[in-house]
Image (tube, coloured by chain):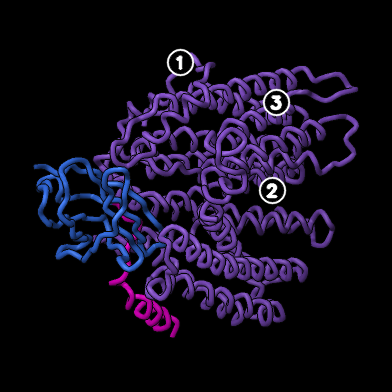
Chain colours: A purple, B blue
Amino acid sequence: MGGLADFLDSLVGGVDRVFFSVAIGGLIWGMFMLKPWSRRYDEKHLSSTVTLIYYGAFGLALTQGFALIIKVWLMNVTLGVWPFPAFADTIQFKAGMVRMIVMGCLAFYVGSKLSLQPTSKNAWYNATALAIPALIAGAWLAHGAGRFDGRIQLMTITVIHQIAAAAWVGGVFQLINIWRLSTRNAIDPMLWPNFLKQFGKLGLVSLAVLMATGLPMAIGYIDSWNGFIGTGYGNLLLVKLLLLAIALFLAYLNNRGTREFFEQNRETLLFREIPSYIQAETFLLVSILFTAVSLATQPPAIDIPKTTATWQETLATFKPRIPLTTSPTHEELMAGEPGRTAIIGQVPSRASTEWSDYNHNVAGIFVTTIAVLAIIASLRPPPSHRGPYWPLGFAFLGLFLFIRSDPEAWPLGPIGFWESTLESGEILQHRIATFMAFMMGVMEYKARHPNNSNKKLIYMFPLLGAFGGLMLLTHSHVGFQPKTAFLIQAGHTLMGVFAIIIASARWLEIRLNDPKQRQIAGLISAFAMLQLGMILLFYQEPLY
Amino acid sequence: MIKHYFQLLFVILSLNASTVSAHAVVTNTSLKIDPIKAGTESKVSLTFNSRVELALSHFDLVKKNDVHERLHVNRGKIRGEVVIDIPPLEPGEHAIRLKVFAADGHLTEDIIRFFVIE
């Protein structure tokens, strides 16, 4: 069951950050945006805001507790011993317990006091004060806590960085909540533009703080350009910046639409397009939170100068070449495995590298073809009696990868399906990814068919695509030397970025009203798919 | 009042500062300058980028045919240093396989290969 523990350990951190943002961002929203004690308020909106904070705090308490349980489980299976009482003496356990208990208390307070007196200034101040220990406890779980130099400064900066991120992400969740209430006619419709306008200022402050705190951390943990390009830490930071840039573009569109509404009384963007932009922005922000967690699992670049890849080595992994379309036989592969996996007398296996290259390159042929067909279908829609066929390509891709991804396990290898799936985090991730690709293909095909009666089915492609992107961003290959692991990771993280773009753009294609904008969003999604396909097409694994 | 509250919280949490470490990787090893000679007991020093929780860490010697043997370790004199007791070994390739727990919750696995000389 070690694989399951490993996989859950990598996911639970991202979920933790989302709940953290909902709770802490919600409190910031209440304290600085709503201020219900000093101005007119909408009762339903206020009540809904408090409920969201309650769910955030409660969810965070549960997730933190779950994270501790998984950690114990993971240590038990990895070290082969019961980790207590030694684990109880670690800062990880103590800070985790403090965070869990404090967030539990916050949830209780919000549910029993703030929800009954949502206009009480004291209640809001008390709730905020209650959250402070959880924020400080978080400092002891960050990278900075372990540094020998500048530890307190780095810890403090990390906490401020986390609060700024929570203000932005939590604020976006609050905006979605206001839109949800608006569409149900539960609140005054003018609340939507008013809070959008106010949020512009909060967003700018959050961004400024994120930059002001992120820069010293980047300088503290990365000491060279190679460290930025050629380590897992630098690579994931680059991914964060890329996703942030796209999120900022959407934030700019929101801001522009809001200004047009107030200055020119143009309602179109505000009530038709901006809600969709904000939903797509949420995809990106949640992905940034998951990337941040993945970043925290990497050793800082400054600590691994001898195993850092050069930028030339990193770029070489994306160099175009003729895709490998012939594979070694399963027997040839298995013959090389004992030598490749041995610790003493290790012999790199050419067959293993070629097996993996073949899998990735053929997957690239699948995805590139699907992307080209999607682009054609976007420019020349299929006849009205049928939908496009390209989604079925994902179903075939899922089947191909299911058979080929893990040759040591069923159906090709001697290790059983359940044994391999539950014991190896990597195999478990492969199984989930291949199943998702299959389901994505089938559901998208059905969703795009004119006879489809289930209108919600169309959202499965972007949702599963975003989840797949998050998996790629937290994908790990264990058992390698750090440089080899990084060179493999670099391609997977970039594919994760494109998967998030595919999902966000597809979401916009579904949600936007203007046919021209929908087509543009669809093309962005298809071109991102093409880029992802190209990475796979030219993928080349280092010999190990 | 609130200021004092924050100060008190930080002091309470700061009491644990000495037990803290982060994602641990080996940044230096004595094997580079002091190779192990066959047939003699020796000590190997590994320096981590941060402190590791020794009670939750394993250090195994890996011999021919990947036979594992648990090693005894102590904290070294400099920060981040771990000193490992190595039993007498035969000449040839060996490795130290480590699974270390950093207090920020990350389990790190690594293999350090070395040659025992005559």
Q: Main secondary structure of the magenta part?
A: helix
**Vertical placement of residue B54 versus A454, above or below:** below
Neighbourhood count class around disc 3 (C-alpha, 10 Å): few under 14, some 14–19, many 20 upward: many
Q: Which one is in front, A287 or B116?
A: B116
Identify the residue under disc 2: A262
In the image, what residue occupies the spot 65% across and 19% down?
A369
- B20 drawn magenta: yes
Give the answer, above or below, for where A418 lies relative to B50. Answer: above
Does the magenta run of residues contain A270?
no
Mark pair 3, 1: CA separation = 23 Å
**Measured from the top left, where is residue A155 in percent x and y?**
36, 63
Label 1 crowding class (10 Å Cα cut-off): few <14, some 14-19, many 20+? few
> Number of callouts in the render?
3
Q: Does mark 1 fall on the same chain as mark 3?
A: yes
Q: Position of residue A228 (x, y in %)?
A: 34, 39
Can the viewer see residue A225? Answer: no
Quarter of the figure with residue A36: bottom right
Residue of label 3? A393
Q: Nearer the viewer, residue A454 or B37?
A: B37
Q: Which one is earlier in the sequence, the residue at label 2 or at label 1?
A: 2
Residues drawn in magenta: B1-25
Please tell me the numbered disc located at residue A321. 1
Q: Which residue type does callout 3 highlight?
A: Gly
Q: What secondary structure is marked by label 1? A: loop
What amino acid is labelled 2 in the image?
Phe
Q: Are marks 3 and 1 in contact (CB under 8 Å)?
A: no
Q: CA distance from mark 2 to mark 1?
A: 53 Å
Q: Are marks 2 and 1 on the same chain?
A: yes
Q: Quadrant of the N terminus of chain B?
A: bottom left
Question: Residue B85's quadrant in the figure?
Answer: bottom left
Please give the name of the residue rendered at 10% of the width and 47% of the height, measured from the top-left corner. Answer: B37
